[in-house]
């Protein structure tokens, strides 16, 4: 893509990029700026020839997906297999409302939090996890 073509496309979609970034970042201005940069990179890399019916919708969806991918890379979730937990002695119990609850025989791992956040609240909780 030539520089002039990119500048033209950026001028057209700049507000869209900002709106999508603000939607995901909410009040976090630094995250919003990072998401906007991710959107600009997507705008630079995208192949508009793949959009057959509605190029605007195609581009908005690509921008949205690239920002979601960025968020997932920044905050990966750690999952444990239920089979593993059951093999360690944990049990599943059904509550009166029909919800399933995992009763753990081991202490719950500490919650992960951002460095700039305050210290996590420490509550005295029975080792139970809602499923």
Image: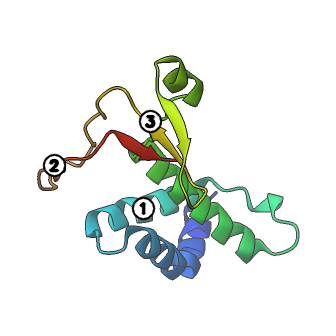
**For marks 3 and 2 on the same chain, the one whose residue lies earlier in the sequence:** 3
Q: Name the residue under label 3.
A: 78
Q: Mark 2 points at which residue?
A: 122
State the residue lying farthest toward the top: 87
Which residue does the image show at 16% across and 47% down from the upper left? 115
Q: In this view, does 105 lie above or below 76?
A: above
Q: What element carries label 2?
A: loop
Which residue does the image show at 48% across and 39% down from the upper left? 102
Q: Mark 1 points at which residue?
A: 35
User: Does the CB distance between marks 2 and 1 fall below 8 Å?
Assistant: no
In the picture, measured across the screen, residue 42 lies left or right of residue 113, that is right
- Rounded to the nearest whole Å, what is the CA distance between mark 3 and mark 2? 20 Å
Q: Is mark 3 on a helix, strand or loop?
A: loop
Question: What label sits on residue 49 in the rendered view?
Answer: none
Q: In this view, does 44 lie above or below 29?
A: above
Discs 2/1, front: 2
- Nearest the viewer among 52 and 10 is 52
- Rounded to the nearest whole Å, what is the CA distance between mark 3 and mark 1? 23 Å
């Amino acid at each position: 893509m030539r520089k002039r073509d990119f500048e033209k496309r950026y001028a057209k979609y700049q507000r869209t990029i900002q709106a999508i970034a603000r939607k995901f970042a909410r009040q976090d201005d630094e995250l919003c700026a990072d998401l906007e940069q991710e959107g600009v990179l997507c705008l630079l890399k995208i192949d508009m020839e793949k959009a057959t019916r509605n190029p605007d919708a195609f581009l908005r969806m690509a921008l949205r997906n690239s920002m979601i991918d960025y968020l997932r890379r920044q905050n990966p979730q750690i999952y444990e297999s239920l089979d593993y937990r059951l093999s360690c002695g944990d049990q599943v119990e059904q509550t009166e409302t029909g919800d399933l609850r995992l009763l753990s025989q081991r202490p719950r791992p500490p919650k992960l939090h951002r460095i700039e956040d305050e210290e996590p609240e420490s509550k005295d909780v029975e080792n139970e996890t809602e499923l």
